[in-house]
Image (cartoon, coloured by chain):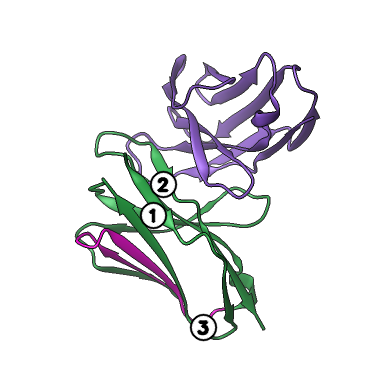
Chain colours: A purple, B green
Amino acid sequence: SQTIHQWPATLVQPVGSPLSLECTVEGTSNPNLYWYRQAAGRGLQLLFYSVGIGQISSEVPQNLSASRPQDRQFILSSKKLLLSDSGFYLCAWSIRGGNTIYFGEGSWLTVV
Amino acid sequence: SQKIEQNSEALNIQEGKTATLTCNYTNYSPAYLQWYRQDPGRGPVFLLLIRENEKEKRKERLKVTFDTTLKQSLFHITASQPADSATYLCALKRSYNTDKLIFGTGTRLQVFP
């Protein structure tokens, strides 16, 4: 069966520090991969979308970047965090052409 | 621009009653619509998918309707239980030729004994 893991689960980072959130998917090949952000009291915002290694689509201009160095690995990064980057970050995957998205456990980021 | 709206106010109902949540969308012609459940501090979990040619879909105590004329989906939980308390999100694909899902803001359901 397929599983998705993301880490760390929680982190508190000072403004201006770098960020790296990592996500891996197991049990499937060539998945679509996604990073979503959920700010407090707000909906899920799609940040990045990837259909293959090195292929990243950015949905909104922001202080973040994403990379996909391997087929089932998706990394969310920032060189310098802003207070507004705080939120709940969710990695997700779907089968190419599939309808359903499967989410990871999420990572809580607090920028102080 | 495309928009998905769900009632941002929490829905509080008594155990045993039927909960009805609403999802409205504009500027879309989706082939199907999905509903997810999200518990606090967790990622959303897929519940049901309904296609544009389906008026109604059921799964155990869950029922979803899809009215493409009204651009609305209703999500019903019958015989609700406190364990049904969560936030429920509706989601649409942005267009036919993409796998990207756009989510509504969700409606929080609280079922009290």
Q: Residue at x 52, y 37 (%)?
A: A92
Residue beneath label 1, please?
B34
Q: CA distance from mark 3 to mark 1?
A: 21 Å
Residue corresponding to mark 2:
A100
* Residue situated in front as seen by the camera: B25 or B62: B25
Query: Which badge, 3 or 1, is on the more N-terminal residue?
Result: 1
| Left or right for A77, reference A66 | right
Q: Judging from the image, what secondary structure is the residue with disc 3 in?
A: loop
- For disc 3, the neighbor class at 10 Å (few under 14, some 14 to 19, many from 20) is some
Residue B67 painted magenta: yes
Residue range corresponding to the magenta coloring: B63-80
Q: Where B11 sits versus B43, above or below?
A: below
Q: CA distance from mark 2 to mark 1?
A: 8 Å
Closer to the camera, A89 or A39?
A: A39
Q: Chain of mark 3?
A: B
Amino acid at circle 1: Gln
**Residue B29: in magenta span:** no
Marks 2/1 in contact by CB < 8 Å: the verdict is yes
